[in-house]
Amino acid sequence: MIKRGRRIRETAAIRAMVRENILTANDFIYPIFVVEGENIKEEIKSMEGNYHWSIDRLEEVITEVVNCGIRGIILFGIPDIKDECGSSAFDSDGIVQKAIKKVREISKDLYIITDVCMCQYTIHGHCGILDGHRIDNDATLEKLGQIALSHAKAGADMVAPSDMMDGRIGFIRNVLDSNGFTHVAIMSYAAKYASAFYGPFREAAHSAPQFGDRKSYQMDPANGREALREINMDIEEGADIIMVKPALSYLDIVRKAKDVVDVPICVYNVSGEYSMIKAAAKAGLMNEKATALEMLLSMKRAGADIIITYYALEASKWLEETN
Ligand code: PBG
């Protein structure tokens, strides 16, 4: 045999030298859920190890994030009041707007990203303004623009629209620019699928649609080429970073995108991907650390530059131990 694959797997030293991909805390963005009220740190039952935080207790988690070497967070707000058009989403005194200011007080360097969407803020739980039972795309754009602007005014570094309305990236870019926020970046949830893997999140964010589903705006899991069309449209409209979501079942999309686009690619390692490993580990079926790190590494190998993950804190600590 002239060719033997095992020679370069013989020792830890050679394996380390030929390793093609590595994970570091720089790769991770940690999602944080903020709620109104005081002195709240309440575990989200469907997503063990993740919490609802009131603003006055954010320092605890932000300090941990920073100590883990994580550079960015994405904020999700759970408001007290919901209405038909999601007004609390763009209130200058809304939950996310207050959280941004608080995080900035605690850390001046932590990169603050905000989720821009309406589903947590509307009574009906859909990601846009309704016209009967249809989601009115263009009326929704106005609201998304207002939400993004209010986040920028509060001090967000980057806004991340997750609604999947057509034309929202260009619309938001325009609103930000014409209000003097040319420096605020946009990360587009460009290829967001109508996925069952969001199940645990909907409990965390109280954002389940009250009728129907999200299939008229989120993508069909059967489609791959359509994702590239969505991604290209968002880049043309000014997206600085594009996202594929969920991650694990969509790594083919990540690879396809990586081969053809030149902006950074983020993946969202969603709630279901997290909670299924937690549950399997709890049942004694798998080693949690090894499985979670392998899952995250597979995302990088597929082409992800950044990973939003509920494992960010744990994974950063695990990597510290192994390095
Ligand atoms: C809101 C939103 C969702 C997630 C992120 N932003 C839920 C949805 O679209 O139903 C899912 C995140 C996760 O499952 O971890 N538009």
Image (cartoon, helix red, strand yellow):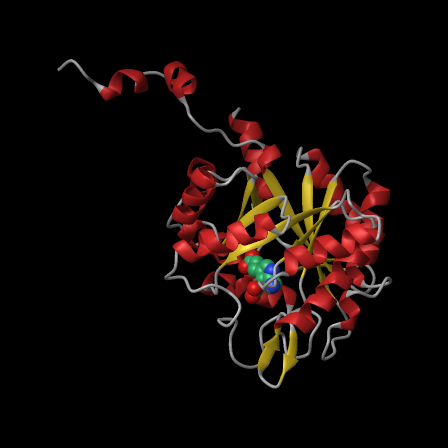
Give the quarter of the image for residue 104: top right
Position in image of residue 138 (x %, y %): 66, 71
Residue projecting furthest to the left: 1
For this rendering, which residue is in front, 318 or 283?
318
Whether residue 198 appears in this view of the structure is: yes
Question: Residue visible at 40% across and 53% down?
Answer: 249
Whether residue 54 appears in this view of the structure is: no
Give the quarter of the image for residue 132: bottom right
On the picture, is 16 further left or further right than 315?
left
Q: Is residue 11 above or below residue 147?
A: above
For this rendering, which residue is in front, 268 or 64?
268
Position in image of residue 183 (x %, y %): 77, 42
Question: Residue visible at 77% across and 48% down?
Answer: 156
Q: Is residue 250 above or below residue 215?
A: above
Q: Quadrant of the N terminus?
A: top left
Position in image of residue 281 (x %, y %): 44, 50
Q: Is residue 199 above or below residue 238?
A: below
For this rendering, which residue is in front, 279 or 120?
120
Question: Residue visible at 68% across and 46% down?
Answer: 73
On the picture, is 6 further left or further right than 67?
left
Q: Is residue 280 above or below residue 63?
A: below
Position in image of residue 177 (x %, y %): 78, 50
Residue projecting furthest to the bottom: 132
Assign ligand 1 to one image quadrant: bottom right
Question: Residue visible at 51% across and 75% down?
Answer: 213
